[in-house]
Amino acid sequence: MNVLFLAPNYPPEMQDFTRGLAEVGARVFAIGDGHPGGLSPKVQRALAGYRSAKLFDREATIAAARSFGVRFDRIECLWEPFVELAADLREVFDVPGMSLDVARGFRDKELMKQRVEAAGLRVPHHARAHTADEIRVAAERIGYPVIVKPIAGAGSADTYRVNSREELEVVLGKTRHVREVSVEEFVDGDEFTFDTVCIDGRPAFYNVAWYRPRPLIARSNEWVSPQVVVLRNPDQPELRGGLKLGLGVLKALKMGTGFTHMEWYRKANGEVVFGEIGARSAGGHLVDQMNYSSEIDLFREWARAVCWKSFEAKVTRDYNVAIIFKRAQGQGKIRHLEGLDRYMQKYGEHVATEQLFRPGQSRRDWKQTLLSDGFVVVRHPDLAFTLHMADEFGASVQMYAS
Ligand SMILES: Nc1ncnc2c1ncn2[C@@H]1O[C@H](COP(=O)(O)OP(=O)(O)OP(=O)(O)O)[C@@H](O)[C@H]1O
Ligand SMILES: [Mg+2]
């Protein structure tokens, strides 16, 4: 089993997917942007071959793939910007897996919504727009408030809620560099994920996580300590609509084998609405959280699914798992942490991992990355207690920078 894996080293969780591929018996060939000397030891151990090439350069990547001189059985990528490239390469090298057309449905947010809508599923009212005038017309037709966001976006970048014509004029100024945008009905409600590892379109594994607060709010307010909570019981009646929607979306978009990460909304009246989906794993350590929930290794199980169409982990769902991201107050370097010792004394036994920055480390740009200045992961069988621990972390642990 020869697998070509794009972007094996970055983002960091790719290192574990690379490891997973080797662990299930694949010979792993990889292409990434980085110098071979910069690969983590974990990746180096897992690889049968590596080429450095700019993944934005299709021809260079194809040439690098050819230079291995082997016949690939799989070509995979789990990093959003290059999921389409992997599909493209599969067609170039005649390798089984998701076609380019199907991959586009998971990447182009308008095409995605058209396909989901055509299957009779509820999506936000939407339009594709290129020029300021097209955006104005779309916003009038859909009705305020609307969301304006890039067609191929990630990390809530350049995503705006627009409440009125006047606000739209301001946002038009800010999004001028985005070539193509989606204009959407603003959907008010709770926001969840639906994550799967699929084999031939059917989830061998599925998970629901809850965003607290909604990502756009977390991304716009620095004082917030954003939480993502893996729910121990995704089969509870309150989530049934989302699960049903998720399965419908996988079918509508012709999912094959691999990871998916979907986002969906639940309105106050119970109506569920599709948000977006990627044919890739979630970022922000959500895969780790799912692993902590059942003590499994989805990095390896994804690899097993992709290589051998099998999934062996036992999904026991023992815990709710909350990750809480922290943002320091002040700019520059972290100077001190407050409340962490007390928190660890109180809840240490429920802390799965604590990776806050320490004094001397430079703050991350919280607008650029959800990871912010580090995070803690807590878990407990009881949801209310898990939320309590998560909220208390947000309120009682502070970091200061200067
Ligand atoms: N139609 C909508 N109604 C309400 N909120 C929305 C809508 N579209 C986007 N948002 C908000 O903006 C956030 C980012 O939008 P979206 O998920 O489409 O973009 P993204 O950049 O791919 O996000 P990410 O990579 O952070 O998941 C959503 O999580 C949600 O909070
Ligand atoms: Mg999103």
Image (cartoon, helix red, strand yellow):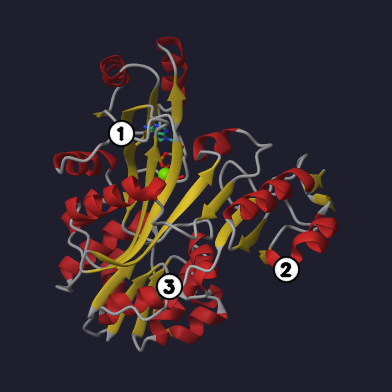
What x and y, as percent, mark residue 335?
A: 84, 50
Circle 2 is placed at which residue position?
Answer: 349
Where is 207 relative to 296, above or below?
Answer: above
Q: Does the residue labelled 1 lie within 8 Å of ligand 1?
A: no
Circle 1 is placed at which residue position?
Answer: 180
The disc labelled 3 sits on which kind of residue? Val
Q: Distance between the residues labelled 2 and 3?
A: 22 Å
Which numbered dot is residue 315?
3
Disc 1 to disc 2: CB gap under 8 Å: no
Q: Determine the secondary structure under disc 1.
A: loop
> Is residue 205 visible in this depiction of the protein?
yes
Determine the residue located farthest toward the bottom in the rendered image: 25
Q: Horizontally, is 199 left or right of 194 in the view?
A: left
Question: Residue at point 45% right, 28% down?
Answer: 160
Taking depth in this image into account, of 26 and 53 the one nearest to the observer is: 26
Q: Distance between the residues labelled 1 and 2?
A: 48 Å
Q: Determine the secondary structure under disc 2.
A: helix
Q: Determine the secondary structure under disc 3.
A: loop
Q: Does the residue labelled 3 lie within 8 Å of ligand 1?
A: no
Where is 360 relative to 300, above or below?
Answer: above
First reached walking from the N terminus: tag 1 or tag 2: 1
Q: Distance between the residues labelled 3 and 1?
A: 40 Å
Where is 269 relative to 256, above or below?
Answer: above
First reached walking from the N terminus: tag 2 or tag 3: 3
Determine the residue located farthest toward the front in the rendered image: 237
The local crowd at label 3, few if under 14, some if 14 to 19, many if 20 or more residues have their Cα within 10 Å, is some
Which numbered dot is residue 345?
none
What x and y, as percent, mark residue 131?
A: 29, 23
> Which quadrant does the C terminus fall into?
top right
What x and y, as percent, mark residue 290?
A: 49, 65
Question: Residue at point 30% right, 76% down?
Answer: 305
